[in-house]
Image: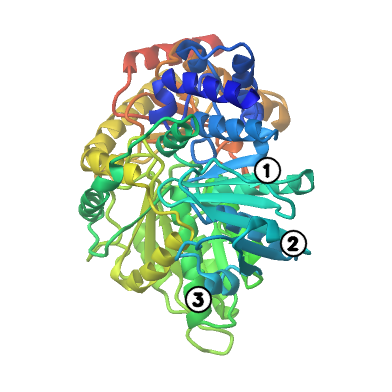
Amino acid sequence: MQDHKILTYIKNVLENIPAGWLNLTTHRLDIYNEEMAKTQFLEEFEALFNDHNSQSLSLNELPTAFDYIRLGHPLSCVLEWAIAKIHHLNADYVISFSSMTIPVLAVLRKNALENKNTQIVHTGELPDFFDTEILQRVYGYRFNIKKVEDLSTISEFDGSTVFVSQQDHICNFDLVPNVDFFININAHLGSIILVNGEQNENYISEIQHVRRRETIAMTPADTLIVLKHLVGQSSFDDTMNTFETSKTQVLASIKEITGTGIEAIVGSSGLSMQYAIMMGLIHDAFEKHKGKAIKIIVPPNCYGGTNDQARRVAACIDAIEVLDLPVDSGKDMVQSIDRVLDKIAKEDAIPYIIAEIPTNPRVEVPDLIKLKDVLSKERKTMDGETAIDPVFILDQTFCPNVHFLGEGDILSTVKTIAYVSGSKFPSGGQCTAGYCVANKKSEALMSYIKLHLRLCNNEATPLQMEILAKQLPSMNQRIFDAYKNTREFVHFINATLPEANINFVSETLAENGFTPSVFSLDLPTKGNTEEEKESYKRALNLKLIHSMINKIPHESKFCVSYGQLNGCYWTIPATSTQGTTKERDKDYIVRVALSPNLDFESHKKVFLDFVESIS
């Protein structure tokens, strides 16, 4: 009876789902309480369920589900809630993935860190890209695989038992004793993991964090298909039929945009792509430089996902250490790279550098000629041998239109991989897919990156490819138009609040192709002590942001987003993009990102009102 009630309600919800649930990467950012982002949506959704309320207007008033689509979104939350309800579980115990293999890897990761045994039990066949040898040798995971014909034959095991089942109806779970994790996988839709038993509750946050950092949740479009299956509705999706056509168009667009001759690789998100890059380079290092230490060099104040992921990789593999690379707020990227590479050379270690150009959040661009020289410089080990060349991993999300790696471009002679978060300008905020490109010096690394993207089943989905195929051809024009808006807004702020300090590219850099549409704003402050000044500035940051999002709610959002088709996005890096960095490295400033299309006069008016309120 309860199952019927749940399924009937879900059916009614599907008839009334708000458009934003399906086609936005973030939903209702104007209703966003960061501290409650993981719970508030479902709490209020369950209240609607109890009231038998499935009206579209009520559903649209629900707050943001999680903080970003790759971690979770309204439809994935509804799916997980429904499955959990049917099995009399808390919704946290069910987690959906776009990837078929990552939920298995999430359990393996936690058990590797805790030195705990894992057995993977399956009926049918595991995906052909689930490479046991690489997972054990490169990732450092320990596990046994066992095929069974009947679930009832699974016996007790000293460790975790993971049961993997390929099936069309991905929501059907046959819960039996002696299994800790049930994972249903579907070749076209992804996977769902069900955590079995309170004794495994401590895995939930770890599995969710893997979804946050190394992959994405099941996409809204695929989740909708699964939900329709759950309630007995047929759902035909023909995007697979257009996948190869879309992929061909996307690869051609990326080649034209980047000026590179090496075929690009497209992943389900920027962090999915970055994870494949990291594991691919580590795999290459294990084969070509056996026994040598690996140093991942990361700016301590860079995007929190990048920072956190690098440290998560290092935590799993003894040979890896993360080193800080100061690049912002008076620290010169080139000088910092020179010092750290000299140190690593003496240790005869393998250097991998991750950096954003322009930097985030201070929007600084290093001297690129000096950068090329310092990356090309021949260094010696303590024994006088030639040191291992660095690989420069460039996050160029802020300026994906700049040519770095093509023949004759500034970094064409340095081993470089460049990647871009596709949720920004490539898709205009319509999907999360990201891509990476290489120069000829790094071409051999691309096969390793592609292998690990496939092993993690983190390739872009057919619909993501379709969106990119549609959006990429207009990207450079949108970048230019958004930059013009940003430059005008920067001029306006300089004129109306000259005491503020704005970090933005110079006119000269813009003429050389660096046309980001994001800037950071240090508001003027006051007080007798540094603590009073900092406290005043932080309060002022929030006052400005809340003025914007409350007075222009249809356009101004409190979000880290960038490159969207419409509106203006505001954030404080210290509490969003830098969420996992050390407190001393955080920037409590305002970061503003403008789109090509917004109501400029309204934004100027609200900002002017704000200035007058603090005068």
529 or 446: nearer the viewer = 446
Dot 3, crowdedness within 10 Å: few (<14), some or many (≥20)? some
Q: Secondary structure at mark 3?
A: helix
Q: Is residue 599 left or right of residue 279?
A: left
Task: Residue under label 3, please give it.
Answer: 285
Quadrant of the image occupied by residue 568:
top left
Dot 1 or dot 2: first in sequence order is 2
Q: Mark 3 or mark 1: which comes first in sequence?
A: 3
Q: CA distance from mark 3 to mark 1?
A: 32 Å
Give the amino acid type for the residue marked by disc 3 in the picture: Ala
**Residue contact between numbered discs 3 and 1, judged by CB atoms under 8 Å:** no
Of the numbered discs 3 and 2, the one sitting upstream in the chain is 2
Could you tell me which residue is drawn at 75 percent across and 64 percent down? 116
Amino acid bearing label 2? Ser
Q: Is residue 266 above or below residue 518?
A: below
Where residue 299 sits, quadrant-wise, is: bottom right
Residue ID for mark 1: 583
| Residue denoted by label 2 | 155
Element at badge 2? loop
**Which quadrant of the rendered structure holds the N terminus?**
top right
Mark-to-mark CA distance, 1 and 2: 47 Å
